[in-house]
Image (cartoon, rainbow, N blue to C red):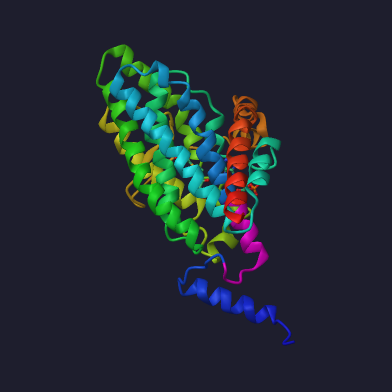
Amino acid sequence: MKEINITELERKFQEKIDNDIKIEPNDWMPEEYRQTLIRQISQHAHSEIVGQLPEGNWVTRAPNLRRKAVLLAKIQDEAGHGLYLYSAVETLGADREQTMDDLHSGKAKYSSIFNYPALTWADMGMIGWLVDGAAIMNQVPLCRCSYGPYARAMVRVCKEESFHQRQGYEIVTQLAQGTPEQKAMAQESLDRWWWPALMMFGPSDKDSKHTAQSMKWKIKRHTNDELRQQFVDVTVPQAELIGLKVPDADLKFNEATGHYDFGDINWDEFWQVVAGHGPCNKERVAARKRAKEEGMWVREAANAYAEKRAKRKAS
Ligand code: 3HC
């Protein structure tokens, strides 16, 4: 039997990547590439599902029927995003139950941003405007990711993400242009969500353990710091347009570079939240575990029905 030449396989694999040929589930790929994708896509999916929790708390407290309908639509979209991404993970051979258990056991991460509490209605606007705005920055390049199923899932996700960001900015704009109390609510919310939103992009490039390799494999098309800078450059003028002040004394437009210079991120806070010690980490994971337990009967019923149908077909 012809000996498999791994070096040759790896060379051909990298050549496909370098020529922007998509890698598909049945293609040969280095195990590290597969594991990196399983790690990133599963954590992305977890972020979509956990991200529904802070918003779900506000459905019954939305100020009117229109806001309630829009928030419901957004939350339902996030569930769909999670489903696309869990399905994309399965194309890499990951087991769905194990993927979910990794979230519940704390082995897998989800985005740090969802470990902050949503305290006022303005937070619903901030999450749409800043969190989904940051997600768009990060997800648009993923539409060109080298792994086919992930890239294709992102195209659909990004279309819906734009609606999420616009509805959030609309909420914040209305508050900022409303009564003094409403404007104060919007500013207080921006003060709480601005820095955690910058942290969503991950550690600085010098501290990122995956970025260099992920860029080589074209899983990432930009570095964490590049995307964070893009987000600041786009979002600061949006805040100024509606009369809100970004809570950063060092923020200043740099004529020489054409970008905003901004202050230092509190990386201790970031790593504390990533390590599970944020304001809501325990509550979020407990909610996901409870959802699995309380939803077990649905899965059991669906599996029983599927088995019965399969038996009837086979007989
Ligand atoms: N929250 C939690 N963990 C984070 C993080 C964050 N914001 N940023 C980085 N980390 C973790 C990484 O997962 C990695 O840990 P691991 O090895 O245990 O997985 C470690 O910190 C080092 O970070 P790196 O930058 O080296 O890791 P990556 O190369 O994976 O980059 C990332 C991190 C930029 C988040 C990248 O994984 C990514 O682009 N993921 C896909 C997009 C995504 O998950 N976005 C999250 C938000 S989704 C969302 O908000 C949806 C919206 O609709 C609600």
Which region shows up in magenta? Answer: 26-40
The answer to whether residue 208 of the structure is visible from this angle is no
Q: Quadrant of the N terminus?
A: bottom right
Q: Is residue 125 above or below residue 218?
A: above
Image location of residue 190, percent across then percent down = 41, 26
* Residue at image coords 30%, 17%: 64
Which of the 4 quarters of the picture holds residue 280?
top right
Q: Nearer the viewer, residue 305 or 45?
A: 305
Q: Is residue 98 above or below residue 218?
A: above
Q: Is residue 158 magenta?
A: no
Image check: 247 left or right of 311? Answer: left
The answer to whether residue 178 of the structure is visible from this angle is yes
In the image, farthest residue toward the front? 315
Q: Quadrant of the C terminus?
A: bottom right
Which of the 4 quarters of the picture holds residue 233?
top left
* Residue at image coords 65%, 33%: 272
* Residue at image coords 65%, 43%: 108
Image location of residue 153, percent across then percent down = 45, 53
In the image, farthest residue toward the bottom? 2
The kind of secondary structure the magenta stretch mainly shows is helix
Image location of residue 248, percent across then percent down = 44, 31
Which of the 4 quarters of the picture holds residue 26?
bottom right
